[in-house]
Amino acid sequence: MNIFIVTAGSRGDVQPYVALGKGLQAAGHAVTVCTCESFEPFITKHGLSYGYMNDDFIRLVDSEAGRKAMGGGDNPLNLVRSMIALMKDAKTLNRAMMRDAWSAAQHAAPDVVIFHPKALAGSHIAEKLGVPAIL
C-alpha cells in the first residue's frame, strides 16, 4: 500500500509522523512524508521517501510576527495585532503549501492519506484522489 503522510510545523509536529512512517514501512508499505523542505534530511535519513513542501511555514513562525504571536506577551492588544499580521501572511502560505502537497501526492499515488491538523491539504488531497484520509 502507498501511504502519503502530510504534516507541517516544528520538529515536534514532524517526528511522530516519521516514527509512524517507519513502522508502516517495516510492515511492508511504501511511505512518503510531505513536509517543509528543511526536514528532508531527517526524513530520508530514516529511509522514508520525501515529498516536497516549501519552508514558508517555518519562515512565518520564525518571523517577528510569528515570534510575537507564539510568545503571547503581556499586552493582549499587541497579541491581537500580531495574530492579524500572521493571518494575512498565512492565507498565501496555505495556498502554496496546498499546491506543494498536491504535487507531492500526485507523484506518490497514495492509497491512503495521513495528515496532521496543521496540514490543511490532507483531507482535500484524499477527497480529490478518492482515497481514505486519516487525521
Image (cartoon, rainbow, N blue to C red):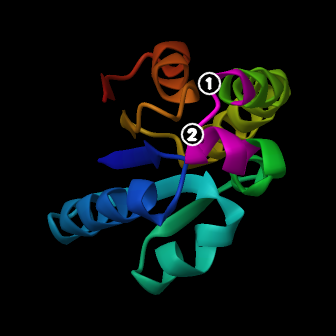
Quarter-wise, where is residue 4 in the image? top left
Residue 92 as seen in the image, left or right of residue 48? right
Query: What secondary structure prevails in the magenta region?
Result: helix
Left or right? Give the position of 31 relative to 122: left
In the picture as drawn, the residue positioned furthest to the front comes out as: 74
The alpha-carbon separation of the residues under discs 2 and 1 comes to: 8 Å
Residue at position x 74%, y 29% from top? 78
Residue at the far bottom in the pictured view: 45
Please tell me whether residue 90 is drawn above or below residue 25 in the rendered image: above
Residues in magenta?
66-78
- Is residue 72 a member of the stretch shown in magenta? yes
- Mark 2 belongs to which amino acid? Gly
SS for callout 2 = loop
**What percent of the width, then of the height, locates residue 87?**
75, 23
Q: Residues within 10 Å of mark 2 (few under 14, many from 20)?
A: some
**Nearer the observer, disc 2 or disc 1?**
1
Q: Secondary structure at mark 1?
A: helix
Q: Residue 18: x, y in percent?
A: 36, 65
Q: Reply above or below: 24 against 117.
A: below
For the C terminus, the image quarter is top left
User: Residue 129 location in percent, x, y?
Assistant: 51, 21
Which residue is the site of mark 1? 76
Drawn side of residue 55 relative to residue 42, left or right: right
Is-magenta flag for residue 119? no
Q: Contact (CB < 8 A) between labels 2 and 1?
A: no
Residue positioned 49% across, 46% down in the render = 7
In the image, is 11 to the left or to the right of 58?
Answer: left
Question: Which residue occupies the foreground of this view, 87 or 112?
Answer: 87
User: Callout 1, which amino acid?
Assistant: Pro
127 relative to 24, above or below? above
Residue bearing the label numbered 2: 72
Q: Residue at x 58, y 44 (%)?
A: 70
